[in-house]
Image (spheres, helix red, strand yellow):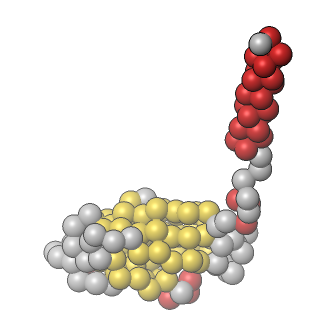
């Protein structure tokens, strides 16, 4: 009886150890995953309205709208997205040239449409 109890304790110890290993183990391929930047569009701004990237860094932009359809356009970085309410628009960017860029909303969204911009800074 005592022997059986000892085995059970040893057994649960093994399960616990296995659980700890699973929690503490390195995340699979986590370092290869691009950084994700979430952007919200609403009349008449992007939030955040300033994004800083590193040259050669691959990032994933996830953009959603809180109200109407907007656009996000920046030719030098190959960004040309339509942002429709109710879904997340995802695009991958890998800037190769440092500089300060101004992305615009290129989908008419109301009276303040012309002022709806976002700055993207690409550092060395
Ligand atoms: Cu937002 Cu045009």
Which residue in the rendered view is the most extreme toward the left? 111
Which residue in the rendered view is the most extreme toward the top? 2
Position of 116 with respect to 81 (left or right) is left
Res 33 → quadrant? bottom right
Position of 110 with respect to 78 (left or right) is left
Quadrant containing the N terminus in the rendered view: top right
Residue 96 vs residue 91, the one in the foreground:
91
Residue 86 location (% of width, % of height): 28, 69
Residue 68 vs residue 44, the one in the foreground:
68
Quadrant containing the C terminus in the rendered view: bottom right
**Would residue 105 be visible to someone looking at this image?**
no
Residue 83 location (% of width, % of height): 34, 77
Res 44 → quadrant? bottom left
Counting labels gives 0
Position of 30 with respect to 59 (left or right) is right
Residue 115 location (% of width, % of height): 29, 73
Residue 38 location (% of width, % of height): 46, 62
Say if 123 sits above or below 69 in the image: above
At 39% from the left edge and 79% from the top edge, which residue is drawn? 72
Which residue in the rendered view is the most extreme toward the front? 1
At 26% from the left edge and 64% from the top edge, which residue is drawn? 66
Say if 72 sits above or below 88 in the image: below
At 50% from the left edge and 88% from the top edge, which residue is drawn? 75
**Would residue 75 be visible to someone looking at this image?**
yes
Res 113 → quadrant? bottom left
Residue 87 vs residue 117, the one in the foreground:
87
At 17% from the left edge and 76% from the top edge, which residue is drawn? 110
């Amino acid at each position: 009886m005592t022997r059986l109890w000892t085995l059970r304790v040893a057994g649960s110890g093994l399960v616990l150890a296995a659980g700890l290993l699973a929690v503490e183990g390195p995340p699979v391929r986590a370092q290869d995953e691009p950084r994700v930047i979430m952007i919200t569009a609403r009349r008449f701004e992007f939030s955040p309205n300033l994004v800083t990237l590193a040259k050669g860094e691959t990032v994933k932009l996830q953009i959603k709208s809180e109200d109407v359809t907007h656009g996000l356009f920046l030719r030098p970085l190959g960004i040309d997205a339509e942002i429709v309410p109710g879904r997340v628009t995802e695009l991958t960017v890998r800037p190769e040239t440092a500089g300060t860029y101004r992305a615009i909303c290129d989908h008419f969204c109301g009276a303040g449409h012309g002022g709806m911009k976002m700055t993207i800074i690409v550092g060395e």
